[in-house]
Image: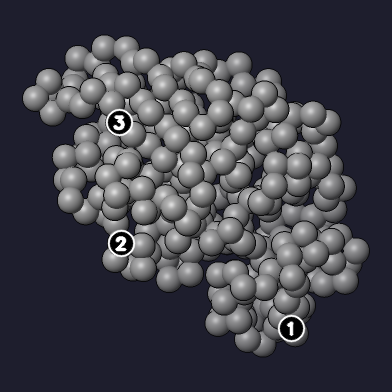
Amino acid sequence: MHISQKAQCLPSTLRALTASLGGACRPPILAAFAVLMAFTVIGGVSRAQNVNTGALPNTTADPANRRVVVRFVTESDYPPFNFYDEDGILAGFNVDVARAICRELDTACDIKVKPWGELFLALKRGEADAVIAGHTVTPQALAQVDFTDRYFHTPGRFAARRAEKKIAMTPEGLEGKSIGVARGTSHEAFVKTFFRSSAIKVFETVEQARDALLRDQIDFIFGDGISLAFWLHGTSSRLCCETRGGPYLEPMFFGDGIAIAVPKTDQQIKELINGALTRLRENGRFEELVERYFPIKIY
C-alpha cells in the first residue's frame, strides 16, 4: 500500500503542491525551498523515464556481493518523494535515496518510472531489483513482496485554526467537535475508530476539508502529516492554522513505516540495500537528504 493509497499522501498533482507553497514555476516542492536545492545531487541524471548514475568507489563494499547495476522502479507523481521537475527530470527524496544507495554499493543505478499498479509486477517479472515509491509495510503488501528496513514514517496529524482554543487532543477532549477528513482514507478510518464522539465531516478531497477549516466551517482536520505541514506553511493556507496533538503513527492505519520493496526470492539485494541504508545513516548523508526535502517539521 502506498503511504496514502493515493489519498493520505501529498497532493496528487505537482501543480497542487506548487500552489500550496506559492511557487510560480517550479512544480514540486518547491519554489519556497529552492535554496535547499544547492545540496549536491548524488550521481548523474538523464531525462525522461530512465536515470543512470555513476558511482564512486566504496571500500566497504564486498566484491563478492557486488552487482553491476541495481534496477529501481518508482512512479512520477508523488512529490516530494518522486516527481518530474519543470525540466522533465526525475527528482525527489526516493530518487536521491536510490542514487545514494547505488553510490554506497559502488554500482550503476538504473531508475525507471512505471504506473503505480505495475510496480510490484515489475519485481515479480524480474524487470526490477527494487521498488522505491513510498510503500508502507502492511500485511497485504508483505503477501506479495519482501521489504528492506524502514527508512521513513508518515504520521497522521490534526490541524486547527490558530484562534481555536487549545484543548486536549483526545477522544474526550474532542467530544462534540467537528473533524474534517478526506473520504476513503486511512485517516477517515482512524478518526471514526477513536473519535466516535466527535462530529466527523467527510469530504470528497483533502483540499475540500482544508478549505472548510480555512473558512471556519469545521473545528479540526485530520490527515497526512507531511502534506499538512507543507500546506500550513504555504500561501494557500493563509497561515490560518497550526498542527495540534500527535503525531499519530499507528501501524494498523498508517502502515509500519516506509520501506523499499524487493523480491521474496532475492535475499542478497535486501541485505545489500539494508547495509547501504545503515552506512548512509552513519555517515550523515541520509539526514542531509531528509533535511533537503523535508525542511518543515512533520513530527
- Name the residue carrying label 3: 70
x 26%, y 19%: residue: 106
Residue 296 pos. (x, y %): 64, 39
Q: CA distance from mark 1 to mark 2?
A: 38 Å
User: Quick check: marks 3 and 2 in contact, CB under 8 Å?
Assistant: no
Q: Is residue 297 above or below residue 139?
A: above
Up the image or down, 36 lies above or below 222; here it is above
Position above or below: 26 against 251: above
The reply, left or right, for residue 38 in relation to residue 46 is right
Marks 3 and 1, the one that precedes in the sequence: 3
Residue farthest toward the left in the current orientation of the protein: 64
Label 3 with label 1: CB-CB less than 8 Å: no
Report which quarter residue 195 is drawn in.
bottom right
Which residue is depicted at the point 67% across and 23% down?
87
Most extreme residue toward the top, as rendered? 57
- Residue underneath mark 2: 144
Which structural element holds mark 1?
Answer: strand
As displayed, is residue 195 above or below residue 6? below
Q: Position of residue 226 (x, y in %)?
A: 61, 49
Kindly state the secondary structure of the residue where label 2 is placed. Answer: loop
Number of callouts: 3
- Residue 19 at what x, y percent from top left? 81, 42
* Outermost residue to the right: 215
Task: Residue at 75% x, 78% y: name it.
Answer: 201
Q: Position of residue 55 (x, y in %)?
A: 34, 16
Whether residue 259 is visible, yes or no, is no
Q: Is residue 153 left or right of residue 234?
A: left
Q: Amino acid at mark 3?
A: Val
Label 3 vs 2, first from the N-terminus: 3
Q: Amino acid at mark 1?
A: Ala
**Residue ID for mark 1:** 199
Q: Nearer the viewer, mark 1 or mark 2?
A: 2
